[in-house]
Image: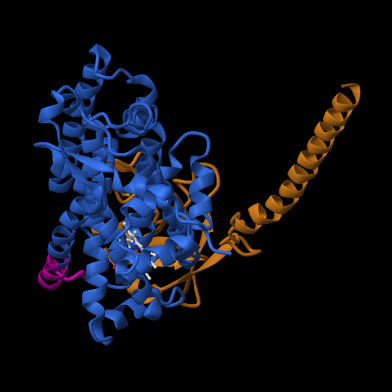
Chain colours: A orange, B blue
Amino acid sequence: MKEAEGTERSRRGFLGFLGAVGLGWLAAAIYPVFRYLSPQAPPDPFGEDGRALVEKITSAEVSQPGMGGNGKYGNRGLLIFRNQSGTLKAFDSKCTHAGCNVAFEGERIYCHCHGGTYDLEGRNIAGPPPRPLTELGVVEEDGLLHVYRLTGGGESEAGS
Amino acid sequence: MKYEIPAEAEERLPAPDTRSGLLSRWFLQRFPVWRTYEHLEGKVVPKHRHSVWYNMGGLALFFFIVQVITGVLLMVYYRPAEPWMSVQRIVMEVPFGAVIRSIHHWSANLMTLALFIHLFSTFFMKAYREPREFTWLSGALLFAVTLVFGFSGYLLPWDDLAFFATRVGIAEVEKAPLLGMWLADLARGGPEVTVDTIGRFYTLHVMVLPVTILTIIGLHLFFIQVQGVSEPDFFAALPPEQKKYEKFFSEFMFGEIPIWLCMGALLVAISAVWPRGLSPEADPFGSAPAGIKPEWYFLSQFQLLKLFPGKIEAVGMFLWTMIPIGILTVPFLDRSIPADDRGRLVTKIGIVALLGLLLFTVWGGLS
Ligand code: HEM
Ligand code: FES
């Protein structure tokens, strides 16, 4: 009787030990898999000088007031246009509603996905977008366009 | 050493000097499955005015088989590194490529539709009650896996409609509390939908999900074979002489064959008349085209979320989350056979949920 209890206890002990080792083993296997599948942080689109080169749209395509379109900086979408007073304006093109890319439509910025509408300052004026677009500063240099991050609200200091 | 044939089998097997008698004995001496055979032979399906619904699960299975066949064929030419180009090649150059792709598209939709009907018909017949809770839960899981199949497959052609619809779809996932952001990043492989996302969706779509769904289908069918088909209350209440049954093997199964054949023909016909289109290649940096809409089976959700924009979006999320929660808990809430007051209330809630889903789907489709 006693002996049986003793073996029963040691059997349980052994099973518990096996369970613990098994769990440890599983954790050791899961962690690398988890890290493998977790996305890496995307590279910062802005280089060391704080600027990013604009691609897929050239300064010739925004040379006159009222001209504009979509391009990219780093691996992000960009909306860039020249407004009626001749200033270059640039926004990250990701709609603040659900992430479609917005389009420049002369009088306004429009998102075809659910009809989100922004004015030319990037303010959400109609439809579902909850926030204004993120504005970027623009510099034009040797016929190349660059954008940079505007700090602190950044509505006033759009570059030229 | 061969197995012995049980006496009750000897009584019923064809005479040992006939060919079928020889063959069945040869088999039973190697695989002693007479008990299982007897069990399956005794399986019946109730016959009543709502019997047609019993075919829906089988129909979904048929469409799934079509998906496996056409999907494997598509894999031969589909290349995740050149998604749009390779699908364009399937459609433009490969003989019958356009048809096979269209069948995969239509059969995916019909599979989802059949499961939808299957889910609601078993719900209204209250087939989830004891002892079939796990049949119901495994079925709910099958439905969920099918939705993920549809969502992941939809992105694979990498055309601009698919691209932005996926971007919007995952942005909705982002808004879910707690795990939403993490899950969205995990699905995309980063903060944006890129070709990395294709790698993830492709692996899911052709490997992880098929293995998962086959396992659950196996369980689901196993439960059904062991437990038999439930009798709805109105049928169970009939006097025994009025209850009619059909044998599962093979009357019911043979009854499915013409349905499957018709559906196969229907698939080919609609695929020929309405081939699946391919819009221009996705440009992750271009502006979104007009006409972005999710597949119809996500429309109701989409429309509900649109109703509650901005700060009150959580209300829409909450309302929508009630449906999966209801599905998962109903076998444990509504248990009385025959249905009591609570059972009837559950039926009414089900009707409201079904009408709501239909209304929001149509509304989402029109707007
Ligand atoms: C073993 C099973 C399956 C395999 C191997 C497979 C494979 C594939 C492949 C290679 C593609 C890309 C080609 C293309 O987009 O035309 C694709 C697309 C797709 N798959 Fe599957 N698939 C399977 C099952 C399913 C299931 C069960 C569903 C849904 C219920 C589904 C829904 C879709 C959808 C909606 C598309 C996009 C079709 C389009 O618009 O072109 N697939 N599948
Ligand atoms: S994503 Fe732009 S309005 Fe919805």
Could you tell me what secondary structure mostly forms the magenta stretch? helix
Q: What is the count of numbered marks?
A: 0
Residue closest to the eye, B67 or B277: B67
Residue B286 seen in the figure: no
Percent coordinates x, y for residue B348 in the rendering? 19, 22
Percent x, y for residue B75? 39, 75
**Quadrant of the rendering where the C terminus of chain A is positioned:** bottom left
Question: The N terminus of chain A lies in which quarter of the figure?
Answer: top right
Q: Residue at x 36, y 34 (%)?
A: B324
Q: Reply yes or no: does residue B17 show up in magenta.
A: no
Provide the residue span drawn in magenta: B265-277
Write the residue at 16% across / 26% down.
Answer: B240
Residue B211 vs residue B149, the one in the foreground: B211
Of A25 and A58, the residue lying toward us = A25
Give the percent coordinates (x, y) of residue B78: 39, 76
Is residue A145 something one can see in this rendering? yes
Q: Quadrant of the rendered structure where residue B241 is?
A: top left
Q: Position of residue A122 (x, y in %)?
A: 35, 48
Q: Residue at x 23, y 82 (%)?
A: B96
Q: B60 or A145: nearer the eye?
A: B60
- Taking B174 as reference, is B110 left or right? left
Look at 44% across and 37% down and name the residue there: B176
Q: Is residue B271 above or below residue B250?
A: below
Q: Tell me: B76 left or right of A104.
A: right
Classify residue A80 by image quadrant. bottom left
Ligand number 1: quarter of image: bottom left
